[in-house]
Image: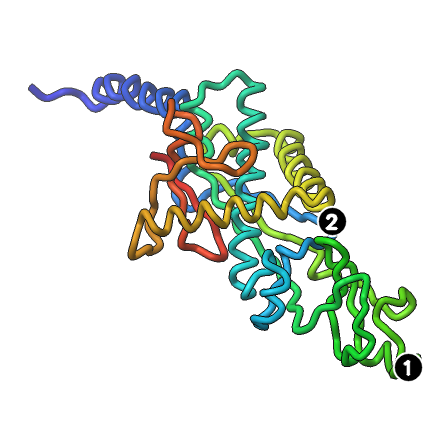
Amino acid sequence: MNIPKTMLSHLTAPFIISLTITSIVSGCGVLPAGQASTWILTVTGFTLPVAMVYTGDAAIRARLSNIASSRGAVQALVNRIVMQTVFDVLESQGRSALLPDAVISSILGQLTINITYEPLECKMVALMPMVDTQDPMDDKCIIVGNTVTGICTKMMAGALGPALMCNMAMVIGAITPRHLTIGGTISTSNIIMANWSRTMWQSVVNRTAAQMVHDVTEQMISQRFEDIRQKMVQVERATPGCHQHQQSVRSPDVNGRLTSPGPPHLNSLSTHYCSLHAVSFSCI
């Protein structure tokens, strides 16, 4: 039997609409290929913890156990800190909107987070208070407690005499702004998030930036860095031969510890744990 095209159109339209509605309600609806909603994230105004600088000097790492060993290691950790903060903010937003856990997980599953951060390299360090008066006058990262507070350079010290120590505030220079700025983008192909108002998106960006500044300034981020570093090690051990493919992992709790498997919450998210410069997710 030949069905007229007009009748076929009427028959298929409800089915297509039904699929679209089901996709949107499930939180897994996607925009057409090549389309995404993207917002810029900039985090500034934080103090610099030792965990966010690096050195290639094994002797320095022996003195400072939480300093990173490479530029890439710091960037990877910053990526994951930002990722978790974005997740925390969006999860809170979803719960405020009374969305089911499964929908929240699907929404988070269509995020792409790209972070840019240029960490500071500390070829030498000066731990405060300084007591070694014979310390050579080379460029040093000035460290007070768990915070890098400034840089002492040979040029600055030499201008005031070779015997002048770096622990005199007048010769300590400011850390370059690029080491105190985390930038990046948050993109989504999820229909629900892509249609959020500018106010809603700006709220997410502002809350993420504020939480990052709070964590770093209050020195909470250093412990969180260690928690996430340990989580990365566990994931890599559990998935040998790690490539840029997706892997299901357990999400960390508020302290960064791995949670036990549970309902479809954030306990099963697909993430590129092998990527150093981007953290991507897809709806599953």
Secondary structure under tag 2 reads loop
Q: CA distance from mark 1 to mark 2?
A: 30 Å
Q: Is residue 24 above or below residue 225?
A: above
Percent coordinates x, y for residue 99 in the rendering? 49, 19
First of labels 1, 2 by sequence position? 2
The N terminus sits in image quarter:
top left
User: Which residue in the protein does label 1 denote?
Assistant: 159
Residue shown at 59%/72% (left/top)?
57
The label on residue 46 is 2
Seen from the viewer's position, the closer of residues 133 and 191 is: 133
State left or right for residue 197 relative to residue 251: right
- Please, what is the three-letter code of the amino acid marked with disc 2? Phe
Secondary structure under tag 1 reads helix
The label on residue 29 is none
Seen from the viewer's position, the closer of residues 2 and 260 is: 260
Q: Is residue 27 above or below residue 178?
A: above
How is the rendered protein coloured? Answer: rainbow
- Please, what is the three-letter code of the amino acid marked with disc 1? Ala
Q: Between tags 1 and 2, which lies in front? A: 1
Q: Is residue 46 above or below residue 178?
A: above
Percent coordinates x, y for residue 184 in the rendering? 59, 51
Residue shown at 59%/32% (left/top)?
89
Residue shown at 66%/32% (left/top)?
203
Seen from the viewer's position, the closer of residues 8 and 160 is: 160
